[in-house]
Amino acid sequence: MLEISPQSAFEEISSGRAVGVDVRESHEWDAGHGENVSWNPMSAFDVAALPNDKPLIVICRSGSRSAQVATAIAAQMENVFNMTGGMKAWHEAGLPMVSASGNPEVA
């Protein structure tokens, strides 16, 4: 499993060079998530739903759950990255977030 910083993850996802997938649960996702990131919660993770034609960046709140998921799927896919620091670090870096309420936060 490879590691990637929030800033680099944002650049790769925004440019379309990589796919971001957030593995947090629904209440966390609804509170706020990165722009252009898809949702595939750890509790019901579906490897078949992942694209395999681009690098994959796995995201959670702090980087722990995403590291577990990234490690598990790295055996099945190439170019799997864990985003270090998770959405807490993304938010602290001032990177764009969206939410259902319009006031994104990290839950």
Image (spheres, helix red, strand yellow):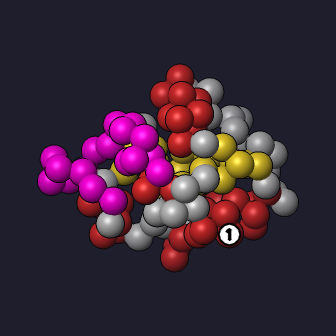
Res. 65 image quadrant: bottom right
Residue 22 is covered by the magenta coloring: no
Q: Which residue is mark 1?
A: 68
Is residue 5 at all visible to an observer of this figure?
A: yes
Q: x and y percent of residue 15 in the render?
A: 53, 23
Residue drawn at x 16%, y 47% is 102
Amino acid type at mark 1: Gln
User: Where, quadrant-wise, is the N terminus in this rendering?
Assistant: bottom right
Q: Residue furthest bottom?
A: 43
Q: x and y percent of residue 57 in the render?
A: 62, 46
Is residue 39 at all visible to an observer of this figure?
A: no
Q: Residues within 10 Å of mark 1 (few under 14, many from 20)?
A: some
Number of callouts = 1
Front-most of 84 and 14?
84
Q: Magenta part of the protein: which range?
A: 89-106
Residue 46 drawn above or below residue 77: below
Residue 73 drawn above or below residue 57: below
Residue 45 drawn above or below residue 74: below
